[in-house]
Amino acid sequence: PTVRSTVPMLRQASAWKGAVKPSARSTRVFSTTGRVAAPPPPPPPADAQAAVAKPPVAEAIQAAVNEQLQQNIPRAQYFSAMEDALAQPDTPTPYVRQVEPLTEEQQPWVPLDGNQAAAYVAYGMSETSFIYPISPATSMGEHMDNFAAKGTKNALGQVVDVQTMQSEAGAAGAVHGAVVGGALCSSFTASQGLLLMIPNLYLLAGELMPIVLHVSARTVAKHSLSIFNDHSDVMACRQTGMAQLCSAGVQEVMDLGLVSHIATIRSRIPFMHFFDGWRTSAEIAKIKQIPYEGFRRMLPMDDLQKNLRNYALNPEHPILRGAGQRPDIFFQNSVAAQRFYNATPDIVQATMDELAQLTGRQYHLFDYYGSPDAERCVVVMGCAGDTVQEVVDYLQGQGEKVGVLMVRLYRPWDPKRFLDAIPASAKKIAVLDKTREEGAQGNPLLLDVSSTFMDVGDMRTIIGGTYGLASKEMTPGMIIAVFNELNKDKPKRRFCVGIDDDVTHTSLDYSEEVSTVPEDITQCMFWGLGGDGTIGANKAAIKNMAMDAGLNAQGYFEYDSHKEMGATISHLRFGKSPIKSRYMITNQASYVACSHPSYVGKYDLLTPLKENGVFVLNCPWKTLEDLEAHLPPKVKSDIANKNASFYTIPATKVALNVGLGNRTNTIMQACFYHLSGVLPAEEAINLLKRNITDMYSKKGPEVVKKNHTAVDACAENLTKIEYPESWKNAGDAMPDRNLKDKLNIPPKVRGVVDKFVEDIMDPVLALEGTKLPVSTFLPGGFMPAATTMHEERALAPEIPVWKAENCTQCNYCAIVCPHAVIRPFLLDRDEVKAAPQGFDTLRATGGSEFSGLHFSIQIAANDCTGCSVCAESCPDDALDMLPYSEYAAAQQPLWDFAVNLPYRNPMDKHSVKGSQFEIPLLEFHGACPGCGETPYVKLITQLFGNRMVIANASGCSSVWGGTATTNPYTVNARGQGPAWGRSLFEDNAEYGFGMAMATKQRRKQVQADVRKAMDESPISDALKGAFNAYLKHSENYEKVDRYVSQIESILPQEVKDDATLSKIQKNMDMLRPQSNWIIGGDGWAYDIGFGGLDHVLSRGENVNILILDTEMYSNTGGQVSKSTQKATVLKFAQRGKPDMKKDLAGMAMSYGTVYVAQVALGADMTQCVQAMKEAEEYQGTSLVICYCPCIDWGMPSMRTMMVTMKEAVESGYWKLFRYDPRRIVKGMQPLQLDSVRVKKEYQTYLERENRFKQMMRQDKDRANEYFQVTNAALRKRHEEMKRNTYDDLELLDYLKGLVGEEVSSDKALVLYASETGTAAELAKVFGTELKRRDIRSKVIAMDDYDIENLPNEKTVYILAATCGQGEFPANSKGFWKALQDPSLPADYLKDTRFATFALGDTAYVYYNKVGKDIDNRLAELGATRIQEIGLGNDKDDEKWETQWNEWLPNLYTEINAKEPPAEMPPPNFAVSWAAPGQTTLEPETDHWLPKGTSLVPMAKSTLLSPPTYERDIRHIEYDLKGTGVKYSLGDSLGVYGWNDIGEVDEFLNWYGVPPESIVTIDDPNDTDKYPHVATARQLFSQIIDIFGRPGRRFYETLALLATDEKEKAEILHFLSKDGKADFKEYLKDTPNYADLLMKWPSAKMPLEYILDFIPPIKPRLYSIASSPDADGDSLHLCVVNEDWVSSSGRQRYGLCTRYMRTREEPKQNPPVPVGVTVRVNGASFTTPANHQQPMIMVALGTGIAPIRAVIRDRMLAKANGEKIGKMALFFGVRFRESEYSYGEEWEQMAADGDMTILAPAFSRDIPGKKVYVQHKLAVCGS
C-alpha cells in the first residue's frame, strides 16, 4: 500500500506543474519475487466510486493525506526533478545553434604552452577541480591553483574550488563525487596516473556523468619508466566508455578543449581530452585565446540543468545510484546507454561547427589535408599530423599525390565520417599509432581503420606502423619513408619508424637530410646547463618574438635525465609563416649557442647548423691558441666547413663577476638578441631589458640591476674568432674515451660495466641513443651497477680544494657531501711515497687503530657539482671553493690515485667519522647540486650497502637513483652492492614488502636444505661445521659472512651428485641475510602510498623504510603534500597551506612495535648514524624520516643546506627522536627525544625560508595567524614528546614544576658534550648505573639544558669530549658560551657539587681541553669538586675506559653510593664445552688474531746487556715482509703476549676443563672479542688474561659467587674500610685472576662469567726503534725483560717479555706456532717537520727506542745527500757498561760530527754521585 500511495502523489506533482507528462515507463509491474505480475485492474467508474460508503476512519486518513499534499505544493519542482531522473531520458540531439562570433580584438594572440591552454579552458568551464601532480600534466593543476588563488572568475562568474588530492585515484574519486553532486568538474593526469583512474572512468561513463579529463599523454612504464610521450596511456582507456578527443597543437588544445567541455554537457558522455605530453603540453606557441565570454556564448545552460544538475544526489529528491546488479539485468542496463554513444559524434561535430561560428576556426572529427586525388594517405592522430602536413606540402611540390587524415574524435569512432573524409583515390593507406600493443594483431588505430573498411567491403592496402614511443622524434625524413613504403608493391604490413630494428626487421630506413621547414622560418638551438636559466630565458624570448615582433613562434625544450646540471636543448623557431614542425631541429639551424665549454667534447653541436650560421660558445678560452688546444677536430671542421660566424664569451666568469652565480642565461640571451638577426640588434637589446624588468622586478631592483649589467657586459666580452682555413681539414674526430681502471671493483664487474658504457651509456650521454639498434638492448630493461663512475660530467664552476694544515680529520665534509665526491682516504707509508705530486697527507689521528696510516681528503673534480655544502659544513676552514677551470686538472689525478687505494676502515663504521671511511655505494648521481636527500641514502649504503635490496618509489630519489644508463649505485671489492628496483609511485611499500617476503621465504628454504644436508648428505666435517655455524648466526650478517665464505669455498668441491647440496649451491646467494629498504619521498609516504605504507608498518616484518621528507612533491616541481607544514606557499597551495603537517611518525609509533626515528643530518650527525644503525638492526619494521631541504623551497643556494637543518631543529620546527620498542622490554621509555630543548624562536626559522616568507608578503595578518597556530601546535607536541620520555618519577617532578610545587632534590644531573656519540652513550650508561644505586638522574646534552636552572642543581656530572684542536662539540657550544658570561657571580654555583670526566687523545695538542675548561669554570663559579677530573685517553690500552674504570669506583666511594643489588647480571655470552672426541667442531684458527692485529715473525733477538747482568735488555727485530704491517716514524708496537701454556694447563685441570676441550662461544652482541670455536687451552693461553691483575670489581663478583661463608667473609673484609690495610698487604704478592679463583674455590666462576669479568689480553706497547725508510721491512724494538719475586717468594714474569722470549725457544712443549701477534699504535709525539730542524733529544733507559728511530731516519736523509740539522742527545741510564744501549752507534756519530752534542748521564757509575740528564742539560744550557 505504501508503494502504491506514492504513485498518485507523483502524478499529482506533475499536475501541479501544469500538465501531466506522459510516462515513458512500462506499465508492467514487478513483484517482490522478481517475476512479472499482471497489470493492476482498471479503476471503477467515478459514480461507482462515489456509491461506495467510506467509514469515518478512512475519511480522517484521507483528510490528513490531503493536508499533507497541500503542504507539498511548494516542493513540486523537487518531485519533478525526481521524476525526471527516474524517467527514460531523451536521446541527445546534435543541434547547431547560432553563436555570436568573436571579433579579432576579442581573440588576442598570446604565447602559451599546451598545458596552459588546457588549464585556461578547464578553469573557465569548471566549478570544481581535483588535482594531483604527475609529469607532464602537473602544470595544468598548478595553473588552476594559481587562477583560483588570484580570485579569477570562471565562465559562470565563480572562483573555481580547486582541491589537491592524495593520488590520481583520489582525484578521480573526488571528480566522480563532484559530478554526482551536480557540479561541472575537471581533472588532469597522465600515464599511470590515468591508469589509476580507470575504475572511476568506467563508473563515470556507466553513469553518463559529464566531466572532462585533460590528459598530457605519456608513456606507461613497462620495462622501464619513461616520463615522455606516446599514446599508451590513453589507449589503455579506450574501452572505459570515455569519449576521446585528440588535439594536435596548442591552438587545438584551446579550441578542442572547449569542444570537450561543451560536448560532454550536451551528450552526457564523459570526455577525455588528450594531447601529446611534452611535445604539445610544453611547447610554447602563439595562439588565439578564446575569452570566457566566448565560453558563455557556447555554454548550453538547458542541457547543463537537464543532463547534470537534475541527476545530482540530493535529499530533497532522493534517488539511489551505484547499486549492485545481478546477472539478470546488468547486460541490458549496459546496452541501454548505447544510443548516447551513437549520438555523440554528431554532437561533437555540431559543437565544432558552433566553435567555427565563434572563432572562425573549423574542425571536423576527421580532417583531411592534401591532394584531392591522393593515391597514398597517412592516417594519424596527435601532433605528428602537423608534421605530416608539412611533408605533404613538400611532396606535393615535387608532384606527388599524397595526403594525411587527422583523427580528432577517436572514441566514439564514427566510421561514416571517416569514410567520407578519406579520398576514394587513396588506395594505399598507412595508419600510424603512437603506441605499441604487445601481442596484438595490430595497434588500436589500425584496427579501427581496418575494420571500418572491412565492414563496407573496401579492400584497400592498409599497413600499420608504430612511431614516437616515449617521445621518439617523428621527423619529415621518417614520414617520407612511410610514403615511400606505400609506393612498394609489397609494403610491410606492420612496421616501425624512427629506430633500427635489427632483430625482427620491421623498421623503415629514413634520412634526416631533408628540410621541409618554410624558408622564412628562423631556427635556433640553445645548449644549456640545467639550472643556468637557459630554458626560462628562451621561453621569455618566444613571448617577446611572438608579442613584440609579431612573429609566429614555437619553442620546444629537450632535457637529459639529470635532476639539475644536465644538458638542455632549446629548439626555437620564429617566422611569418605558420609553424607546423612538431619535431626538434635537426638541420638548417641559423643560430647555435652552447652554454658550457665541456659540451664541445661531448655532443655533436654543429651538425644542425646551416651554411653561414652563427655559433656562440661560453668558454674561458680567449685566444686562438686556447681554442686550438681545447676544441675537438670535429668542432673546428664543422665551424670552418659551414663558414660559421664563430663567437666566444666568458659568460660563466661574467655571471660570477656581476653576482648572478652560475646563471649565464641573461648573458647568452644578450648574445642571441645581438647576433641572431631576428630583430635589429638595438631594438632586440632594449626588448630584452624590458623583459628582464618584467621578469625580475618581484625579486627586487638589485636583481634587475645585475641582469641589466650582464646584458651590457655582453658587448664588451663577446669576441668574434677569425679561425684559420686549416680548420676545414681538421677531421671529424671527437675526444677519445678512455675508461679508467677502478681497481676496487672486481674485474668481472668492470668488464660488464665497461662494455655497457661503451655500447650504450656513452652514446646515450652524447644524445646519440636514438641511433642504437634494437639488438643493443636486453629485453626487460636491466642494467649493471656502477656506471656513473665513468660519467665525469665536469660541470662545476667551482670545486673544493683541501687545506691539509687546517684539517682535524673529522670527516664532516664527506658525510654531508650529497654526491660522494669528497672522501677521506687512509694510506700506508709506501702508498704515500707512490702518490702523485700534490697529494697532501697528514698523519692519521684517532687512536691506535690509525697507527702507521696517513690521512688525506681528495675530491673527484670531474664529478663535483660545486654545491659548496662541504665547505660550508667544515668546522676547520679546511676547504676553499676555487675555479674548476684553474684547479680541476691538478686535482683529478689525485682522485684517480686515491680511489684505487685499498679499502681501510680501522674504526667502528657506526660512527660519524668511521662511517666515512666506508666506501659509499651511491656516487656521482644526477641529483640537484646540494640535494638534501642523497646524503642519507649515501650514508646507509656506507653502513649496509653490501647487503641492501632497495625498493624505490617514483620521485626524485628514483630519478637520481634509477635513470637509464647512469646507475649511481656501485659495488665493493667483492662485487656486492645495493640491488635496486622501482615499481610505481603508489605501491612502493607493497613492492618492497613483497621483495622482503620473497627473500624470507627463499632463505627459509635454503636453511631447511642446509639442515637436510647435515642430516643426510655425505659432507666433510669442515662443511658440517660451517653449516652448523651458519645456522646459528644466519640472521647476523657480520658473523655469518665468514661462515658463508667458508661454505662458498668448500661446497663446490663436495656437491658431486648430491641433489640437496646442488640445490644449496644454486641458491648460495640467499645464504647471507639481506637488508631490505623501502625508500621514497613524502609524496609517496604521506599521500599516494600511505595506505600501503600503513599496512606494511602494521605487519611487523623486518623491513626498513626511509622517507626522504622534502615536505612537498619535489620531483614534479614543488607541489603541496600532506607533509607540507601549515603556512607554506607552494604550487597547489598558492595562498598558503591551511592545515598542519601530517604526523606520520606519531601514527607509526601508535603501533608500539615499529622502530621510528626522525633525523636531520646537519643538526646531529651522530644521532642520524645511530638511528640508521638501530633501525637496521631492529628485527621488525623500522621507519626513519629524514629532513631534506630542497632547492624548490626557494632557497637561494643549497650550500647552507646543513645549516638549514640545524636551525629547523633548534627552532622546534623539526624534532629529532628515536622510538625503540626494544626499550620497553628493558623497563625503559621507548621514546628518546634527542632534541630536548628548543633553542631558537620558531619565527626565526620561518623568516629564513622563502616558502614561508611568501605568505607574509601576500597577507601579513593571515600569515601571522598561521604562524602562531603552527608554533603553538609544535610547542604542544614538543612538550608531549618530552613527557613521553620521562619515567614515572621524572614525570611527577615535571608536573610539579609546571604547577609551582617543589621538586625533589635527590637527583643528579648528567651533562654531556659529544661530537661522535661516545660521550653521549657513556653518559646514558652512567645514568643507568646511578639509578641502579638508587640515585635518580637526568641525562641531557649541554645545549639541551636550560643553564638558568644550574644553580638549583645539587649534583652535576660532566662528561665531555674534545674535538680537533680543542673545539667544543656542537651540542655544547651554547652551554659553554652561557657559562662564560662574565656577569655570573663567583658564588653562582655555591650549592652545587660536581665531578668531571673528559674524553680525549694525547695525540692532540689540546688534550681534553673541553673537559678541563668546564671543570675549571664550574670551580670558578663556586661549585665544589667531588673529586679530581678524570682524563680519558684514546691512546691507553682500553682507550678512555682505562681511566674511567679508575675514576668511577672512586666517585662512588666519594658520594657514598649504595651498592647495586647483590645479584649476578645475566651473562653476555652463551658458552658450552665438549671434551675431546665428543664433537666434530674444530677451532676456527690455531692462532687467534684480535681485530686489527697481524702475525709477524721475529727475525732477530740480540742481548744488549751483559749476560750476567740482572736486567735482560734486548734488541729485537721483526720481519714485516708480506705481513701487510706498516708503521710510521715515532709509532709504537703493541705486542699481544700469550700466557704460559704449562701454567694454563695447570689451571684448566684444576678448573675441571681438559685443555683440549672444544669451547663454543655465542656472542649475541657481535663484539668479536672471542672466536666462535676454540680449544680451552687456546682460549686461556691466547685470549683470556687469566694471569692478569684483577680490579676491585672482580673481588666484588667473587663475593657474590662464593658459597662458603668463610670465603665470602674474607673477600668482603678485603673490600671493607676495616680490611683496607690487609687488602693492601695481600696485593703485594701480585695475585692474578687464577690465584683468586683457586684461593676461594667456592666462588668457582662459570665459564660464561669468566668471559664477562676477566678481560682479553691487552697489548703491551713498545716504542719502535727503527725508521721505516732506513730499515725497510725490519721493525726494531728495545725491550727490557720484566720478572720479579713476589712477597711470598714466588717468581713472577712480565707476560709480554716472557712471551717474546718463547719465540726464541721453539723447543717448548707443546710447540708454539712461529710468529708474534702485533698491532702498530700511532705516534705519541710529533716528529720534526723536516730534516733541517735542530733536535734536542732526551731519553731514559729503553726510552731510547723512538729517539733511535728518528736519528736513523735523519741519517738516511744525510746519506741521500740531504742537509740535516744539528742533534743533541741526552741519554740517562744507570750504568754505561750494562745499560748504555746502542752506545757504539752514538759514539760513532759523535765522532763523525753528526751528533753535535752527546751527553750520556750514568747515574750509578760514580759511587756517591748521581748524575742525571737534567745535570747534563744544565751544563749544556748555553
Image (tube, rainbow, N blue to C red):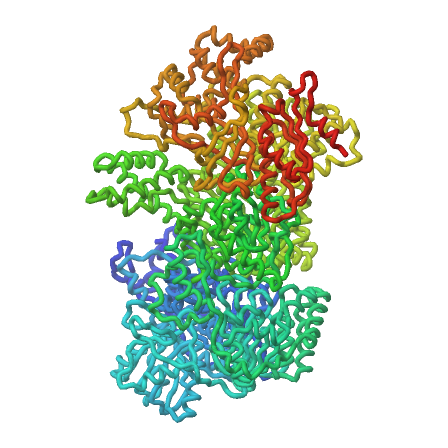
Is there any visible trace of residue 1016 in the rendered image?
A: yes
Q: Position of residue 224 (x, y in %)?
A: 39, 61
In the image: residue 1415, left or right of residue 1082: right
Looking at the picture, tell me which residue is in the foreground, 738 or 882: 738
In the image: residue 1012, left or right of residue 1671: left
- What residue do we see at 45% from left, 68% from top? 215
Q: Position of residue 662 (x, y in %)?
A: 62, 64
Q: Quadrant of the C terminus?
A: top right
Residue 1253 against residue 1025 in the figure, above or below:
below
Q: Position of residue 1263 (x, y in %)?
A: 67, 54
Is there any visible trace of residue 1568 in the rendered image?
A: no
Looking at the picture, tell me which residue is in the foreground, 1198 or 1788: 1788
Residue 863 against residue 262 in the figure, above or below:
above
Q: Quadrant of the N terminus?
A: bottom left
* Total numbered labels placed on residues in the image: 0
- What residue do we see at 43% from left, 11% from top? 1642
Q: Position of residue 163 (x, y in %)?
A: 53, 59
In the image: residue 765, left or right of residue 649: left
